[in-house]
Image (cartoon, grey):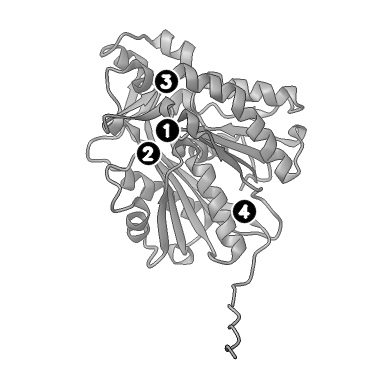
C-alpha cells in the first residue's frame, strides 16, 4: 500500500491589489525636431504632423538603462512611503538591455537596497509595463509576493539608426515605475492581453543593431485593433466607458492615441475624458511611457487620487495588454 501523498501548504490569498506609488525619470538631454533635421530629410512640422512629437530625451553614453530604472524605482518607493526592505519582488519591463545577461531587475534591486528579492526582466516591448503590472498583481493575489516594484525602462537611443527617419524621430529614453501592494478593495483590474505573432516582422531589430519598424503597417494595426482591447479591459473590470476619467495608452504616436480615444468615445466614453499626450515632450519610450505619463499627469494635476484610469499598451511582438486601475 502506497503512503498517502502529503498536502502542500499554500500561502494565504489576497483578494485585491492597488498601485501604492509611482515615479519616473527622463534624461536631461533634450533633442528637438530641428536637431534631427540636421541629420536626415525631415523637419519640425513634418514630425509634428505625423507623430505629434515636439521633442524627446536621449540618455548620454554613460547613463545606463539600469541607472534610469533605479532612479524611477526609488522615486516610486518614496511616493508610496515604502522602504526597500518592504519589497520582495522586482520586475523590470524592457526590450533594450544591451545584453541579455545579467538581467536588469537583480541589479536594480541590489542598488536600491532590496536584498534577496525575486527579480526578473520581462520583454513585451511597448506593452511591457501593462504585462508586468498584471503579473505583479497576480503574484500578490496568489500570496507569492507581498509588495512588487514594477519598472518600465528603455534606452532606445542605443538601438536607433540616426539616419532612419521611420524610427529616429520617434523613440526616446526614460524609465517609469510603480509599487504594487495589497488593497481592501480592487484598484487594479484584470489584464486583457494577447499577441499577434503573425505580424512580428513589422517591428524587429535589424542586423541585431538597429530597430526597424514598418510604420504604416503598425499604424493600421494600432488604430483598428487596440481600442477593442481597451474595451475588453473595461468589460473584465466591470467598468463602463462612461466611467473612465483618464485614458493612458502607450505613447506610440499622437495620431494613434487620438484614434483610440475617438473609438472609445464612440462607444460611450465621455468627451471630458482626459487623454495622455506625454509623447509630445517625451517621445515614444516603449515600456516606460505609461507609468511616466501617469506620473507626469499627477504632477500636473490632470489626474487625481481615485480617478478611474484605463491603461492600454501595444507594440513589438506584436503584443498588447490593458487594464483598469484607480489612480493612487
Q: Residues within 10 Å of mark 3 (few under 14, many from 20)?
A: few
Question: In the image, is 68 to the left or to the right of 190?
Answer: left
Label 3 vs 2, first from the N-terminus: 2
Label 2 vs 4, first from the N-terminus: 4
Q: Is residue 45 visible?
A: yes
The answer for how far apart the CA atoms under marks 3 and 1 are is: 17 Å
Q: Quadrant of residue 206?
A: top left
Residue 130 screen position, x and y as percent: 54, 43
Q: Quadrant of residue 42?
A: top left
Label 4 vs 1, first from the N-terminus: 4
Read off the residue under disc 2. Answer: 154
The answer for how far apart the CA atoms under marks 1 and 2 are is: 6 Å
The answer for how far apart the CA atoms under marks 4 and 1 are is: 24 Å
State the residue at coordinates (42%, 9%).
46
Residue 207 screen position, x and y as percent: 26, 29
Please report contact status of discs 1 and 2: CB closer than 8 Å, yes or no: yes
Q: Nearer the viewer, mark 3 or mark 1?
A: 3
Q: Quadrant of residue 232?
A: top right
Q: Residues within 10 Å of mark 1 (few under 14, many from 20)?
A: many
Read off the residue under disc 1. Answer: 285
Q: Secondary structure at mark 1?
A: loop
Amino acid at each position: 500500500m502506497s503512503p498517502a501523498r502529503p498536502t502542500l501548504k499554500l500561502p494565504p490569498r489576497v483578494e485585491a491589489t492597488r498601485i501604492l506609488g509611482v515615479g519616473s525619470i527622463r534624461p536631461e538631454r533634450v533633442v528637438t525636431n530641428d536637431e534631427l533635421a540636421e541629420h536626415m530629410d525631415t523637419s519640425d512640422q513634418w514630425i509634428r504632423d505625423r507623430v505629434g512629437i515636439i521633442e524627446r530625451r536621449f540618455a548620454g553614453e554613460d547613463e545606463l538603462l539600469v541607472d534610469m530604472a533605479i532612479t524611477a524605482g526609488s522615486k516610486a518607493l518614496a511616493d508610496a512611503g515604502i522602504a526597500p526592505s518592504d519589497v520582495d519582488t522586482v520586475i523590470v519591463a524592457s526590450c533594450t538591455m544591451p545584453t541579455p545577461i545579467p538581467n536588469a531587475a537583480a541589479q536594480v534591486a541590489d542598488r536600491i537596497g532590496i536584498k534577496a528579492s525575486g527579480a526578473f526582466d520581462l520583454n513585451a516591448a511597448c506593452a511591457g509595463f501593462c504585462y508586468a503590472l498584471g503579473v505583479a498583481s497576480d503574484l500578490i493575489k496568489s500570496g507569492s509576493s507581498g509588495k512588487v516594484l514594477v519598472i518600465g525602462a528603455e534606452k532606445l537611443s542605443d538601438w536607433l539608426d540616426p539616419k532612419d527617419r521611420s524610427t529616429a524621430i520617434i523613440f526616446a529614453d526614460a524609465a517609469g515605475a510603480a509599487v504594487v501592494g495589497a488593497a481592501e478593495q480592487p484598484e487594479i483590474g484584470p489584464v486583457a492581453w494577447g499577441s499577434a505573432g503573425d505580424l512580428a516582422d513589422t517591428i524587429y531589430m535589424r542586423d541585431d543593431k538597429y530597430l526597424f519598424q514598418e510604420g504604416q503597417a503598425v499604424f493600421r494595426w494600432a488604430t483598428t485593433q487596440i481600442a477593442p482591447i481597451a474595451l475588453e479591459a473595461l468589460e473584465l473590470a466591470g467598468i463602463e466607458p462612461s466611467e473612465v476619467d483618464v485614458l493612458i495608452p502607450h505613447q506610440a504616436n499622437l495620431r494613434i492615441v487620438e484614434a483610440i480615444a475617438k473609438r472609445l468615445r464612440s462607444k460611450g466614453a465621455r468627451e471630458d475624458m482626459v487623454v495622455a499626450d506625454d509623447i509630445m515632450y517625451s517621445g515614444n519610450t516603449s515600456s516606460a511611457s505609461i507609468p511616466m505619463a501617469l506620473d507626469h499627469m499627477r504632477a500636473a494635476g490632470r489626474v487625481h487620487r481615485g480617478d478611474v484610469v484605463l491603461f492600454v499598451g501595444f507594440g513589438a511582438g506584436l503584443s498588447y495588454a490593458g487594464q483598469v486601475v484607480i489612480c493612487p
